[in-house]
Amino acid sequence: MSDKDLKKDSEVEETKASENTKETTTETSNKDLVKENEQIATEEAKPSEKEEVEEEEIVSEEKATENKKEAVSKENSDTKDDDDDDDEEEISSSDDTDEEEKEETIDYSSLSKKELINTFKTLLSSKPVKSIKNEVEEIKAEFNSKFTEALEEKKEEFLAEGGNIIDFHFSTPLKKEFNSLYFDYKEKRNNYYKNLKKDLQANLSKRQELIEELKGLLTAEENINTTYNHFKEIQSKWHEAGAIPRDKYNTVWNTYHHHVENFYDFLHLNREFRDLDFKHNLEQKLKLINRAEELSFEENIDKAFRELQMLHKVWKEELGPVAKEYREEVWEKFSAATKVIHDKRHAHQAELEKKFEENFDKKVEIVNKIAAVLENEKPNSHKGWQASMKKVQELRDKFFEIGKVPRTKNKEIWRFFKETTSAYNKEKNKFYKDQKKAQFANLEKKKELIKIAQENKESDDFEVVTPLMKKIQADWKKIGHVPRRDSDKIWKEFKAACNFYFDRVHAQKNEANKEEVANFEEKTKLLESLDSLELSGDHKADLATIKNQIKNWKEVGRVPYNKKNIEQKFNKKLDSLFGKLDIAKREVELIKYDNKLNSIASQEDERKLRNEHFFIRKKIDETKAEINQLENNLGFFQHVDDDNPLVKEVHNNIQKHKDQLDVWKAKLKKIKAL
């Protein structure tokens, strides 16, 4: 049982104990009290017993929370590191109040190491150090888990590169920053509890001195007025003395209360002062009753309940009895006002519990969906994992948006959520860890390609090495990613070797290009001469002239690749000249095609010839298909005269396609002849 439970159990009984003490003291120390005063002392105990029953109802509602706090404290202590052994002992103050157990709202496993540090800083700067222990320990566990994972990866890399485990050391600026921050937290926390312990002990000494001073009033040789004022002064100092160690509270309070009752027994000898005190207590208790009745209109039920607890504490600890004729009445009023708030709170709690149960079911459903993502949609690519992570993040956001669950199920659903998301993160991390292993394998493959490039970059056997260099460039693109830290370095090495080789190839080609430049200049002159060429009007002579110009053009040879558009200009000139002749379209097209084939052949590009051959074959097939389709269409006109305009158009189209087919076939024959 916790100190608070001990305290509350004692509080339930302490009024009875003090009243019993009071009766005993009255009999032994004040035998000359009149019978009336003995009767008053006996009856004063009765309302106190009722008071105990009502207060027991109030404090019992806090016990479940206290037990939960003990469980959380034990759970945290199990994970405490060795480096916390020198922590200052946590001390409970008598002024400590129980707060509702907070529902977990942050999934620290979803944060990066930098985000964990920033969250730690925010907690340390914005909240009391005594209230953040649970959050700090969870942040620490998550940070160390992520750091350990990174450390293991670096260790694997170190050993894979031939390192000795004895020489391995790994740390990061983030790790150093976290350690420094955690040290500051421990120091701040230890200082807080050292100062608290010092203050509580000082307050305890003050209260013990006041008790001794109170005891001395019964033997003081002074006027009763002076004694009474002295008593009031002690009471005032007692209320201002401050908190004391929680484990000392019951003993000290019972001792103080015992001597207060002894003083009241002593005071009964003087009816004037007794009645004056009764009047004061009645006035104060009526104020408490009025305030308790006002609290029934407070919309915030929790706020009203907390203030009601404070009213009961004042009623019990700070105020004494009232006159006999008012005793039952004032207590019944106070109890009635208390019951109204209790009933409203119970009804409010019942409604909340229904909502909390619904929230619990919703959260279970969301966690099951997260588990289903892992089981049914396990990705096998980076893109797939990115989409999966986005989906899971959306589910996590919904989980935290739902709201509270019943206290008894809070740890259950949080554990379920943490275990499920941890399992998901484990699979995700495993995938990317395997990806890193694959990247190291890719690194070795690319290093082999670099070696080949460097061994061949100075070769003069261009016909053999050029295809090899092009192949390793293609292989490089297929291999895949390498570790980021090596990516730029190996790419620069590979690129430098390839560029060195191809710069030499291009230099050799530039020598050959000098001839092509001369050819371009020659063809430019021929092109200009066509502008001044005039036809005689003799069909055969003019055709021979044009063919001679084509022959001269062919004999010049190829031009630089970036100047090949001169061929198009030449063909346009030919179109203009052929347009002036009365010559069949088919013959013109084939003459021009001869020139085109000559241009392709001069470039010594087998790929272009293959593409041209494929293009002509495709056109032949398409034209044949068109002819077949048109001939099939004629079947729909069997009973229509050939003079019909539509039938004539179909026949004309068929003939046009057949003429074009002859041209395509002639072109194909020319390609095959090369």
Image (cartoon, rainbow, N blue to C red):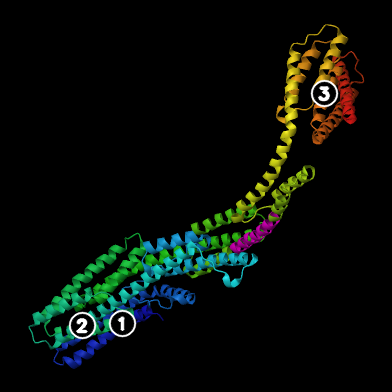
Pick whichever, 36 or 571, lies toward us: 571
Of the image marks 1 and 2, the number of the one nearer the N terminus: 2
Residue 209's tag is: 2
* Residue neighbourhood size for the residue with mark 1, other residues' Cα within 10 Å, grouped as few (<14), some (14–19), many (≥20): some
Q: CA distance from mark 3 to mark 2?
A: 126 Å
Q: Position of residue 95 (x, y in %)?
A: 31, 73
| Quadrant in which the N terminus is drawn | bottom left
Residue 248's tag is: 1
Q: Position of residue 74 (x, y in %)?
A: 46, 77
Say which of marks 3 and 2 sits in front: 3
Residue 673 in view of the camera: yes
Q: Three-letter amino acid code at disc 3?
A: Glu
Q: Splitting the image into 4 quarters, where does residue 670 fall?
A: top right
Q: Three-letter amino acid code at disc 1?
A: Lys
Pick whichever, 246 or 275, lies toward us: 246
Of the image marks 1 and 3, the number of the one nearer the N terminus: 1
